Image (cartoon, rainbow, N blue to C red):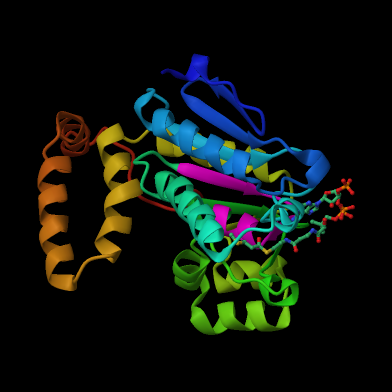
């Protein structure tokens, strides 16, 4: 199957100049994540990384990035514990496909990034927030628990103490404070999608093999012992750092034609 054959309902896909824009497209339900949306993520991210796309902007229709788990679907389906464990495994499949995709995924955030919406955002490689973005884990208030990887990824971003506080008390982070604790890497005054696109274009200029390593190996290595991770790092660096695309760039540096690494105004 290729990208053109995909029949998506709750996600929208467009590709321009090698950059894919994936849009959560359930604005009427504040982009709540129902089972179908999760299946569409799995389908899409099974194909996108092999489609020649160089980077992805993950954005959302309407004022909110995502209101998290579709609470109404969950309520109506009267799921058993076993049912919901299987639901969670599909969420993990979807979000692992994003985090380990090997292509940069930049999340453009706005409005509510809550519960499962934050779990989705934390699977991206970079998060850009605007001034109206807010982050919350209201699971405790709803009588729920995270099931889409927050115990791993959100705890990784902000530490377990902050995560537990958010879940127990409903604490909401926004603006500078959200940036400071690590819920986003960029906080901008304008449109987060425009900034995410700018970052995606910058990342897309890197050789695909370098991006593959950055957007998969680091995550894999975090799951390993330090000894195994250092071995895996050597293997990955052996492959990436000897690629022809690196040689070309190193030649440019040696010939003094490559850009130097300096802040813009220096
Ligand atoms: C939804 C959902 C949803 C909205 N599931 N339908 N997440 C939450 O606890 C967040 C719940 N949502 C909200 O607090 C608010 O909807 C928002 C602050 C995000 C947006 O408020 P607002 O005033 O713009 O919209 P609204 O009027 O509340 O909602 C518009 C519609 O979206 C309405 O449906 P309608 O048919 O009455 O028009 C809402 O029911 C619907 N909607 N959010 C289903 N979440 C793997 S475990 C993860 C566990 C979690 O994610 S817990 C966090 C759940």
Q: Position of residue 139 (x, y in %)?
A: 67, 71
With 171 as the anchor, is 102 left or right in this view?
left
Q: Is residue 185 visible?
A: no
In this view, which residue lies farthest toward the top? Answer: 4
User: Which residue is at 67% across, 83% downward?
Assistant: 168
Q: Position of residue 125 (x, y in %)?
A: 46, 51
Image-quarter location of ligand 1: bottom right
In front of the other: 70 or 107:
70
User: Which residue is at 53% across, 53% downward?
Assistant: 87
| Residue 251 sits inside the magenta stretch | no
| Residue 117 sits inside the magenta stretch | yes
In front of the other: 165 or 238:
165
Q: Is residue 109 visible?
A: yes
Residues in magenta, as a range: 105-120
User: Which residue is at 21% across, 38% downward?
Assistant: 253
User: Which residue is at 45% across, 35% downward?
Assistant: 45
In front of the other: 181 or 165:
165
Q: Report how many numbered discs are placed on residues in the image.
A: 0
Q: Is residue 224 above or below residue 57?
A: below
In front of the other: 9 or 81:
81
Q: Position of residue 56 (x, y in %)?
A: 50, 35
Q: Is residue 259 above or below residue 229?
A: above
With 160 as the anchor, is 164 left or right in this view?
right
Q: Position of residue 247 (x, y in %)?
A: 14, 33
Where is the N terminus found, in terms of image quarters?
Answer: top left
């Amino acid at each position: 199957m290729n990208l053109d054959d995909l029949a998506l309902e709750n996600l929208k896909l467009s590709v321009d100049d090698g950059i894919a824009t994936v849009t959560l497209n359930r604005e009427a339900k504040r982009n709540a994540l129902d089972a179908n949306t999760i299946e569409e993520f799995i389908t899409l991210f099974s194909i996108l990384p092999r489609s020649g796309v160089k980077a992805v902007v993950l954005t959302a229709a309407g004022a909110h990035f995502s209101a998290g788990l579709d609470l109404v679907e969950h309520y109506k389906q009267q799921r058993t514990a076993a049912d919901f464990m299987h639901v969670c495994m599909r969420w993990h499949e979807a979000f692992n496909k994003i985090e380990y995709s090997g292509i940069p995924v930049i999340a453009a955030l706005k409005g509510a990034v809550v519960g499962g919406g934050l779990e989705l955002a934390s699977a991206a490689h970079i998060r850009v927030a605007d001034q109206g973005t807010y982050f919350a884990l209201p699971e405790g208030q709803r009588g729920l628990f995270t099931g889409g990887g927050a115990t791993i990824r959100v705890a990784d971003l902000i530490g377990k103490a902050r995560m537990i506080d958010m879940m127990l008390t409903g604490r909401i982070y926004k603006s500078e404070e959200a940036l400071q604790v690590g819920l986003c890497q960029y906080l901008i005054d304008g449109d987060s999608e425009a900034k995410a696109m700018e970052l995606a274009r910058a990342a897309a200029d890197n050789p695909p093999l370098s991006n593959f390593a950055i957007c998969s190996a680091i995550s894999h290595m975090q799951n390993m012992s330090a000894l195994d991770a250092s071995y895996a790092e050597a293997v990955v660096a052996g492959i990436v750092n000897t690629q022809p695309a690196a040689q070309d760039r190193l030649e440019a540096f040696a010939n003094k034609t490559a850009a130097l690494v300096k802040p813009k105004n220096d």
